[in-house]
Image (tube, rainbow, N blue to C red):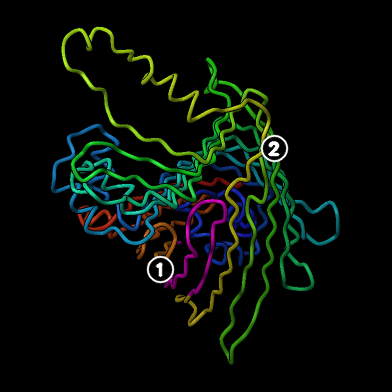
Amino acid sequence: MKRVLFPIIFFFVTGYSNYLFAQWDNALVNDQSSKKMAVGIYGNADYSSNCVTSAFAYNFYMGNYLDANLKQQVSSRLQGMNRLGFALNYGAYGVLYNDTLAKKKIYNFFVALRHKQYLNISFTPDDFNVPFFGNASYAGKTAQLSPFYLNSLSYQQLEIGIVRTNFGGNAQFGAAISFLAGQQYSALAVPQATFYTDTNGQYLTFNSNAQAYQSDTSSGYLTRINGYGASLDVYFKAPYSIGKKTGTITLSITDLGFIWWNKQSITYQRDTGYTYSGININGLSDLQNASFNTFSADSLKNKYFPFQKGHFYSLIPVTFSVNTNTAMSEKFHLEFGYWNVFNANAIGYTYVQADKYFSHGWMIALQAGYGGYESINCSLYLAKQFKTASLALRVNHLQGLILPTQFGGAGCYLGYTQSF
């Protein structure tokens, strides 16, 4: 059964939180099981940030009042560059452990259908302070609103793959191709932007160089396919030994692909400036004759934010990961690893993890790492291996759950697999 579950760990479990436990394949593949196939379901939600606390994020999402303390907790944590990421992913899969291509059982075949949704932002301190505290404290100063990057993406994925479990002896190699159905995409890149407030509040000046992309938002866009694409997954695993201790090293690339959005999509690119000095009103007649259309949202959009419709393509978040798993003893393993998510405004994540195996199929692990969207991360993993099934639970960003006003992060994964 554990060998049957090997491709599940590398190909079916996706999303931000799942990048943190892709190394769990080594706890599942070393069983010479006679099971022929497996099916399962999984789901995870994950939020993390190096500055926006869990308490602030929760109240903002729920529409609750954001008091001064909540905002100050975030402001005091702001750095030169700040990150925020969210992922919601779930799906179903099936694995066939096939023995018809050769005398030995060396191939696994699998198929998966899943939904993926991402939001990630990188921003400056002024990007937070200006909208949440106002610009009064910026009188006579220039707020630096760049660089600012935002990506929001949701799509469905159908994946088909193959794994050779005895490639080159005891090594393993796998590859999979996915067909993507794009649902929604928004992206904003602002490499240069400033906001100046006059000392006496007489005028405001905004300058920016920005590019924006938006998928089709016409009626019913959330219930139809607005783009098509494809992606590729590959991985390689090989054994090693250090003295009398043995282990494995695993490398993988996940979701290397793109989506081509339909012709109703919107593209914007502009390098412009705008100065607002208000409206002079000396009496009621001036108020009655004032042409507010000059300052309407449509007129401003047409003048300063012109856009054009047409096809464009976007890259999806792609992950490179490497993991080493060394058996310190029969029931204790030590892991070191690194992953990086590209096209997602994250930084590389480095971690160390301790795995402890118990009787009756129980296993528990604790991971500590640095990077991603948060600064530090601590995760707890619990798994139970039954005779013909397995159940896994992972809680990410324990620091953000235990101290929600000081850290930003909360995540949970739950997966169930049944073998036959």
Q: Amino acid at mark 2?
A: Gly
Q: Is residue 119 above or below residue 173?
A: above
Residue 341: say if magenta: yes
Give the image location of residue 272, x and y in percent: 49, 39
What's the magenta region? Answer: 335-361
Classify 10 Å Cα crowding around label 1: few (below 14), some (14-19), many (20 and above): many
* Residue depth check, mark 1 versus mark 2: number of the one nearer the observer: 2
Residue ID at (81%, 62%): 104
Residue ID at (65%, 31%): 261
Location of mark 1 (residue): 369
Residue 229 is marked as 2
- Total residue callouts: 2
Q: Amino acid at mark 1?
A: Gly
Q: Is residue 360 above or below residue 112?
A: below
The outermost residue toward the front is 282
Q: What's the distance in space between the residues labelled 1 and 2, CA to CA?
A: 33 Å
Principal SS element in the magenta part? strand
Give the image location of residue 90, x and y in percent: 50, 40
Which of 239 and 101 lies nearest the eye of the viewer? 239
Give the image location of residue 391, x and y in percent: 46, 50
